[in-house]
Amino acid sequence: MTPLTTLYNLTLLPTSKLTGIPTMNLSRLSLATTAAGFLGFGIACLVRPKTMLKKVDIDATSNTGTTELRAMYGGFEIGLGAWYAYCAAKQQYVKPALIAEVAGLGGLVATRFASILAKRPRPIMYPILAFEAATLTTGAIALKRELARNRLESIPG
């Protein structure tokens, strides 16, 4: 077993019955990307909430504020990231997770874009929007493919 295969096995990805090699389609890639984004940002905000969020002009003015930032931007995002990672590994959860991904990121992207147009924030918002929009687009394409495949599978043979 190669180190790469071992790494894939640790991520709980399904393997090909024919070759034993881990498989990753667009749906799982989209969910894994979303998981990585939520987990990475969540862990960073859990460990260094003031440092991370000050970059986007969010500042805690008390221990209560720091606790809230850790909980919402740290704990909540870590939980979502773990859920997306789990769903990426379990075929029966891929479609519901993609629906949640597209709905959540769709709301986030639409609101961030409208706010950028209305308020002209600092340029740090542009790469954030670009990453979120790219992830949303990937998720939407993957969801469309999943729904089309489900329709084909439901046609009597």
Image (spheres, helix red, strand yellow):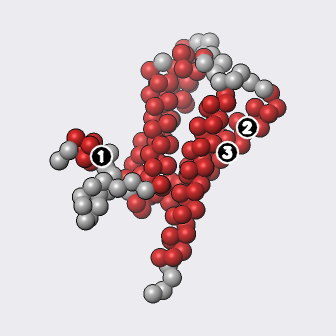
Q: How many other residues sit within 10 Å of disc 3, few (<14), some (14-19) or many (≥20)?
A: few
Tell me residue 152's x, y (percent): 51, 76
**Which label sits in the foreground, 3 or 1?**
1
Rendered residue at 58%/21% (across/down): 53
* Rendered image: mark on residue 113: 2
The secondary structure type at the circle numbered 2 is helix
Which mark sits nearer the N-terminus, 3 or 1? Answer: 1
Going by the numbered disc 1, the residue's amino acid type is Tyr
Residue closest to the eye, 17 or 44: 17
Q: Which residue sits at x=17%, y=47%?
A: 1
Task: Please state the horizontal and vertical placement of residue 60, each as a whole percent of the image.
Answer: 60, 16
> Residues under labels 3 and 1: Cα distance?
32 Å
Amino acid of disc 3: Gly
Question: At numbered mark 1, what does the secondary structure look like: helix, strand or loop?
Answer: helix
Q: Which residue does the numbered mark 3 point to in the structure image?
A: 107
Relative image position of residue 96 (x, y in whole percent): 51, 58
Q: Nearer the viewer, residue 146 or 94?
A: 146
Mark 2 or mark 3, earlier in chain: 3
Residue at image location 49% in from the left, 36% down from the top: 37
Q: Residues within 10 Å of mark 2 (few under 14, many from 20)?
A: some
Q: Amino acid at mark 2?
A: Phe
Q: Are marks 2 and 1 in contact (CB under 8 Å)?
A: no
Instruction: Name the mark on residue 8.
Output: 1
Label 2 vs 1, first from the N-terminus = 1
Image quadrant holding the C terminus, namely bottom left
Along the line of sight, which residue is nearer the eye, 92 or 128? Answer: 128
